[in-house]
Image (spheres, rainbow, N blue to C red):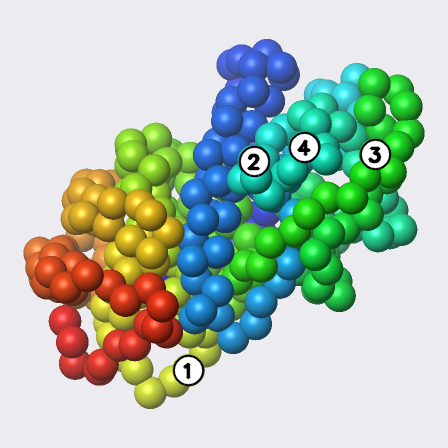
């Protein structure tokens, strides 16, 4: 699907603040690690590239105002997308003060006025690309400078949105997936296909008017999702299961914009009967199912 969306990471009530944060951070880390592999593999198909460090951050501002008052105002490292990329320069729990001399308070500011840790990655994607970035961090109460290595990838974010509905969507720049869909998808391979499908919409700028029909764009995104999941080392065959899950959560809801699920699943199976060429740019011919 293609929609604009706003950032939101607030989890349903019932659990304590610390429990809720742990829950949110588990979703953030899982999605960030899958997204990293997909965006690294998608570099060959992306019109632009970015150099990004492999850390995953959380911040108080991502939670309901006032409820987490004891947490630091600085975003903190919750883990890494790629241990080799992280190179030991940062540790979980490190609080980030500055990146390339820009205060994080500035980097967390989004174009939409919201202050969130996700915005930091969007700002880094727009910085002058570097093999490593200089960070000022706070570790166990002490300030220190660290150089964090970066890797080339296809820019943009995959945002986790709280919600029981089985949704994934995208605009021209970013992808979003709901916690409801993540819970039902099960394997990371299935999540990789969904992220790859939505990433295709951003790479091919599908929300702009073009020669392709909406259904053709969806068919191309299906094949790209399977293609890039395979190239990122996931099991692309799990795309078939992923579509079955989406179907079970959206009964009848996508029939106007997408081809029938059976047709989509057959098209993916047929595409995967030949090993995807991950060195070459992805190509798709109009009229393919
Ligand atoms: Zn789509």
Which of the two labelled residues, at mark 1 and mark 3, occupies the earlier sequence position?
Answer: 3
**In front: label 2 or label 3:** 2
Label 4, label 2: how far apart the Cα atoms are: 8 Å
Which image quadrant is residue 281 in? bottom left
Which of the two labelled residues, at mark 4 and mark 3, occupies the earlier sequence position?
Answer: 4
- Label 2 neighbour load within 10 Å: few <14, some 14-19, many 20+: few
Tell me whether circle 4 and circle 3 mark residues in contact (CB < 8 Å): no
Depth check: give the residue in front, 45 or 73: 45
Relative to 284, 95 lies left or right: right
Disc 1, SS = loop
**In front: label 4 or label 1:** 4
Q: Which residue is mark 2?
A: 83
Label 4, label 1: how far apart the Cα atoms are: 45 Å
Please tell me whether residue 28 is drawn above or below residue 271 in the rendered image.
above
Taking the spot 62% from the left edge, 63% from the top edge, the residue there is 50
Please tell me whether residue 14 is drawn above or below residue 197 in the rendered image.
above
Taking the spot 57% from the left edge, 39% from the top edge, the residue there is 84
Which of the two labelled residues, at mark 2 and mark 3, occupies the earlier sequence position?
Answer: 2
Please tell me whether residue 211 is drawn above or below residue 31 in the rendered image.
below
Relative to 267, 140 lies left or right: right
Disc 3, SS = strand
Q: Which residue is mark 4?
A: 88
Q: Which residue is mark 3?
A: 137
Relative to 245, 91 lies left or right: right
Tell me whether circle 1 and circle 3 mark residues in contact (CB < 8 Å): no
Which image quadrant is residue 279 in? bottom left
Can you tell me whether the CB of the residue at mark 2 lies under 8 Å from the nearest atom of ligand 1? no
Q: Which residue is mark 1?
A: 209
């Amino acid at each position: 699907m293609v929609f604009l969306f706003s950032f939101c990471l607030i989890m349903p009530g019932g659990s304590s603040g610390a429990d809720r944060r742990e829950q949110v951070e588990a979703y953030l880390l899982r999605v960030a690690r899958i997204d990293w592999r997909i965006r690294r593999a998608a570099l060959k198909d992306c019109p632009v590239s970015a150099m990004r460090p492999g850390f995953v951050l959380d911040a108080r501002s991502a939670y309901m105002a006032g409820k987490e008052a004891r947490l630091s105002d600085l975003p903190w490292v919750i883990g890494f997308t790629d241990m080799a990329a992280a190179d030991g320069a940062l540790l979980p729990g490190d609080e980030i003060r500055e990146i390339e001399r820009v205060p994080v308070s500035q980097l967390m500011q989004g174009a939409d006025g919201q202050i969130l840790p996700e915005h930091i990655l969007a700002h880094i994607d727009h910085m002058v690309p570097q093999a490593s970035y200089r960070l000022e961090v706070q570790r166990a109460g002490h300030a220190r400078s660290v150089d964090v290595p970066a890797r080339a990838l296809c820019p943009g974010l995959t945002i986790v949105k709280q919600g029981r509905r089985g949704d994934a969507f995208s605009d021209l720049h970013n992808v979003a997936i709901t916690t409801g869909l993540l819970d039902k998808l099960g394997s990371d391979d299935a999540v990789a296909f969904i992220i790859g499908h939505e990433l295709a919409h951003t790479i091919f700028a599908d929300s702009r008017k073009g020669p392709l029909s909406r259904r053709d764009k969806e068919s191309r995104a299906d094949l790209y999702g399977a293609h890039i999941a395979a190239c990122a080392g996931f099991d692309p065959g799990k795309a078939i299961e992923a579509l079955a899950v989406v179907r079970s959560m959206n009964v009848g809801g996508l029939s106007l914009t997408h081809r029938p699920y059976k047709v989509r699943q057959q098209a993916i199976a047929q595409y995967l009967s030949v090993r995807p060429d991950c060195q070459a740019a992805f190509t798709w011919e109009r009229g393919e199912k």
